[in-house]
Amino acid sequence: MRSYVPNTEKERLEMLHDIGMNSMDDLFRDIPEDLKLKKPLDLPKPLSETELRDLIHGFVYMNEEGGPLFRGAGAYRHYIPSVVPQLAMRSEFYTAYTPYQAEMSQGMLQSLFEYQTVICRLTGLDAANASVYDGATAAAEAMLMLRDNKRKKKILYSAALNPDVITVMKTYAHCAGLELVEIPVTDKGVTDKAAVAANMDGAAGCIAANPNYYGCIEPMAELAETVHAANGLFVAYVNPISLGVLKRPADYGADIAIGDGQPLGLPMAFGGPYVGFMAATKKLMRNLPGRIAGQTTDAEGNRVFVLTLQAREQHIRREMASSNICSNQMLCAIMASMYCCVMGPKGMREVAEQNIAKAHELAKKLTALDGVKLRYPDTPFFNEFVIDVEDAAEIDKALANYSITGGLVLPDGGMLWCATEMNNTEEFDFVCDLIEDTLDPMGGEE
């Protein structure tokens, strides 16, 4: 690394002499001699920028996971307008950090305020925070909101939530001393409303997803009514893209809306980083974790922004804090708000409609194959659905041989498939042909 030190040899010697040393090697004299490298590193010769680009492109072409994608289960491939990553790469956003000093961070605070506004518009609720780490964290923090508001430690949750989300919730619950009660799924693939009613005694509330993990559209208004009848709070875990066509959480009575903002302009990126969004009614605003960017006026009447309602342990006594989350996903939140603003209501609706249309087209083609059945044929679904088929693992392996990421093989042997606006009919036909060959390699011959 010596050649990368931007000092002359004379300057280096002067600095060494000031600390009582004669050479750079003296800096490392505490390292045993047998551990020191005695020769130059065995590295290839330097490459020009063009040569390096060609090398990297070669690695990309070798990537076996670059084919059609039919898997969601919490992370989704959507079209991202090129303006979103381009604007996000501006140094004002890309290097942004915690806006501790409001007077020096007006642009940053305004960006968070705009993000909160977008989330409120999407969910229909009154207030949103400046984001948490991901959707699973948002669900876990929502449990604490239920506990703190109702002063009850019993929380109901739907078994149709994403299993990864449930795992994080259980981790939080163990440490917070909460009692989690799982509500089963009916043979229609949705949360059992009767089981919710039967378990609400002594419960602070219930958390359910729409669409749920199996892609099914839940009867959210009925679930909310059941929970409210027992004086509980209802939390809706939603896919934000679905809100382009489905009712907003506020419209069916949800008290809190949460979810993962990954579908809103964030690439899949091997699983993150993502952004968890949280919104609530005005009554619950002070229970929101993390931070909230607020709008006010200064002494001269100018529009300014501040951090407000920070019930977090950096600012108040730890035992009084509503959460130990002291940060937010600033860059991801900004990208999500950019995506929503670029798409607009019309664009969001079009994307959601395409997701529904593509998923139903794929489901129709798959279930036309012998031995393939839709698990919940009578239940509406968004962009995911479950099929039952023999040898799901074998199908997954056969598709992988063609660089196709097929539906997720579920523990019970089913397959959870997903289609978005990024998929097309040619891909559907190709994958169906491969599945048909796998299920009947002899082509029907005896």
Image: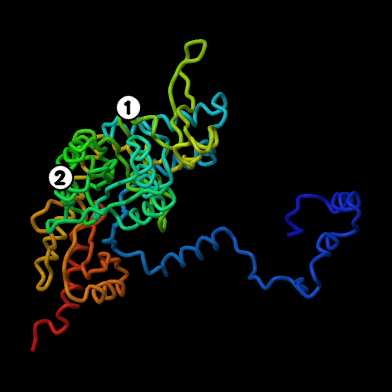
Q: Are marks 1 and 2 in contact (CB under 8 Å)?
A: no
Looking at the rendered structure, which numbered label has been put on residue 282? 1
Which quadrant is the C terminus positioned in? Answer: bottom left
Q: Earlier in the sequence, mark 1 or mark 2?
A: 2
Say which quarter of the image contains residue 243.
Answer: top left
Element class at badge 2: loop
Q: Between marks 1 and 2, how big is the CA–CA gap?
A: 24 Å
Above or below, 147 relative to 425: above
The answer to whether residue 69 is visible is yes
Above or below, 359 relative to 330: below
Say which quarter of the image contains residue 164.
Answer: bottom left
* Image spot of residue 233 (x, y percent): 26, 37
**Amino acid carrying mark 2 in the image:** Pro
Farthest-out residue, top: 300
Farthest-out residue, bottom: 446
Which quadrant is the N terminus positioned in? Answer: bottom right
User: Along the line of sight, which residue is nearer the eye, 294 or 266?
Assistant: 294
Left or right? Give the position of 154 relative to 8.
left
User: Along the line of sight, which residue is nearer the eye, 142 or 243?
Assistant: 142
* Image spot of residue 26 (x, y percent): 86, 61
Dot 2: within a 10 Å radius of its alpha carbon, few (fewer than 14), some, or many (20 or more) residues?
A: some
Element class at badge 1: helix
**Amino acid carrying mark 1 in the image:** Lys
Looking at the rendered structure, which numbered label has been put on residue 239? none
Above or below, 312 relative to 294: below
Task: Name the residue: 59% across, 60% down.
Answer: 48
* Image spot of residue 215 (x, y percent): 21, 54
Q: How many marks?
A: 2
* Image spot of residue 312 (x, y percent): 49, 36
Looking at the rendered structure, which numbered label has been put on residue 219? 2
